[in-house]
Each structure stands twice: as C-alpha cells, then as structure tokens.
Amino acid sequence: MRSKLSYTLIMLLMFFCPLWAEEYKGIPCGTWIEISAIPHEDYHFVRWNDGNEEAVRLIEVTEDLTFIAYFASNCEEYANWPVVALYDWLLMINVRAINEQGYYFDPEDVTWYRVVDEPDDMHGMFPLDDQLVGENSYYLTLDKSLKGTGNYYAVVDVSDVRGLICDGLMRSEIVCYSGASQAARVALLPNSVVVGQQMKLTGLNPEEDTHIYVYSMTGQLVQTLQANKESTYMLDPVPMAGCYQVKVVSETINQTMRYIVNDD
C-alpha cells in the first residue's frame, strides 16, 4: 500500500529555442543543458511533468520547452509519531497524542515492522525489506522479550484525512531493542515512591542532551523534560497515584522504564 502524494511545491522552467537571430542571448537550438530540481527543506522531488523521475538530468534544446518539477512534503518520515514501550514485550502507538494532532484512525490502519539493515525509504518502494511483524492493531507483542531482537516502528495509514498538511502513510518513531547492553546502562532509583519523593535517573550521557517523556498507563503523555548534558537527573514523580512509563531518548540512548506512585 503506497501513500498518495500531495504536490505542494512546483518549479517551472521555460527554454526558448530561436532559429533566426544569431545575436539572441538565449539558448541556441541543439544545445545540451543540465537542469536540476532541488527541494526545499522537508520536501522531496517527485517527478518532472514529462514523467521523468531524475532530479538532475540532461536535455537537448531542439524547440521551445517547458519543464515543471513537482515536490511533496516529507510527512511520512517526519511524522515520528510516538510509541509507548511497556514491560519490554509490548509496544503501543500513542493514539491519544496523535488524536490531539487532529489525526484519527482505526486499528486496521496500523502496521508494524522490524528494521532490516536500514529503515526502508518511504518515498520509494515501500515496504522493501523491513520485516512485517504485526498488523491491524494499536499494539505489537512478541512471544518473548523485545530486548536484543531489533528495532521496530509502526506505519499508520491516514489517507482519508482532510484539511491537514500530511496524509498517506505516516511512520512512528523507531523504538530500539537491538542493544541490550545499552538499555541496562540507564537506571531509575527508586522506582516505587510516594507523591513528592524524588527519583534519580542515572547513566545518562553527559555529552548529550537527553529528552525524558513520562506516560500514563493509558499512553497519555503527562510530562516532557530535558537533561542538558548531565549524567544524572532528579525526577519528580507525577503527583497522582498510579503506574507510569519513563522514556529516555538521546543520540545514543533509547530506553523505557517504569515507576509506581503509591498512596500516602
């Protein structure tokens, strides 16, 4: 299943081939020239109006010519929709957070993949070699722990949306389970507290900014925090009894833990 393309940027090139005036400053007939279609940031080249899909091409000017380059937004890869990881064996697309962006979809619109080598290019033939591991569900579960099994993502088909910038196939963030040793490096202590009792997040990379996301067990994002080049971070619990997921993300870390807030 491929996403439909919304051509939102257009580049127009016109070439005139005069046959009668040697002093004419344009392009003489019979000349070969190179034309290029260079997209703006967050867009990609799709095709020329004659169907050619080469962004850089050589053409021979034999008559008056018009070339139109069509571009589409990189919505599919830049969506980076949130996924909540639970218990090292369950992944869940964060439906609530996506609904808040104006996108609504059913379980039948969700497909799960495991990355093979590099994530497939969603602007080409998709899927290419990434492995299909689940479909028709907000959730992905395996018959064993996800640790050490690879990296995973969801693709959501929102082809039927109207009035929003992006539609078609939207990819979630990639959840990394390929490095079990990395996951064991970060710790949250203690992981059972009462309201007002701070926890310490240790094992962060002091050379990187670390993003910290806290989710309720229903998948609702309740806190967004950041540790700026620190190896530890003092975390205040959500001021309500319950079980919470903590997702820690940096350039080298992608780990999810949980903690419990007990009644006083």
Image (cartoon, rainbow, N blue to C red):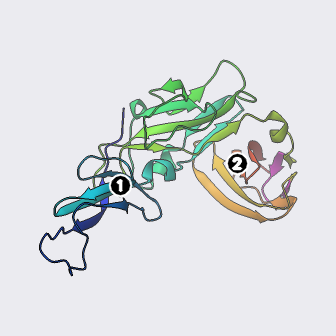
Which mark is in front, 1 or 2? 1
Q: Which label belongs to residue 58?
A: 1
Q: Which label belongs to residue 14?
A: none
In front of the other: 115 or 71: 71
Q: Residue at x 26, y 46 (%)?
A: 51
Query: Which residue is most to the left?
Result: 20
In front of the other: 211 or 77: 77
Dot 2 crowding, Cα within 10 Å, few <14, some 14–19, many 20+: many
Query: Picture coordinates of residue 99 (x, y %)?
Result: 43, 50
Query: Which residue is most to the top?
Result: 143
Q: Residue at x 84, y 46 (%)?
A: 186
197 in the magenta segment: yes
Side of 258 where 39 appears, left or right: left
Q: Residue at x 42, y 62 (%)?
A: 38
Disc nearer the start of the sequence (1/2):
1
Q: Given the image, on which type of amino acid does mark 1 rest?
A: Leu
- Give above or below for 148 relative to 37: above
Q: Give the quarter of the image for residue 40.
A: bottom left
Side of 164 where 256 appears, left or right: right
Query: Picture coordinates of residue 244 (x, y %)?
Result: 70, 45
Dot 1 crowding, Cα within 10 Å, few <14, some 14–19, many 20+: few
Q: Given the image, on which type of amino acid does mark 2 rest?
A: Lys
Q: Which label belongs to residue 247?
A: 2
Query: Picture coordinates of residue 218 (x, y %)?
Result: 58, 42
Side of 255 where 52 appears, left or right: left
- Give above or below for 239 relative to 174: below
Q: Residue at x 75, y 29 (%)?
A: 148
166 in the magenta segment: no
Query: Picture coordinates of residue 264 (x, y %)?
Result: 80, 51
**Residues rendered magenta in the picture:** 191-201
In front of the other: 152 or 138: 152
Q: CA distance from mark 1 to mark 2?
A: 49 Å
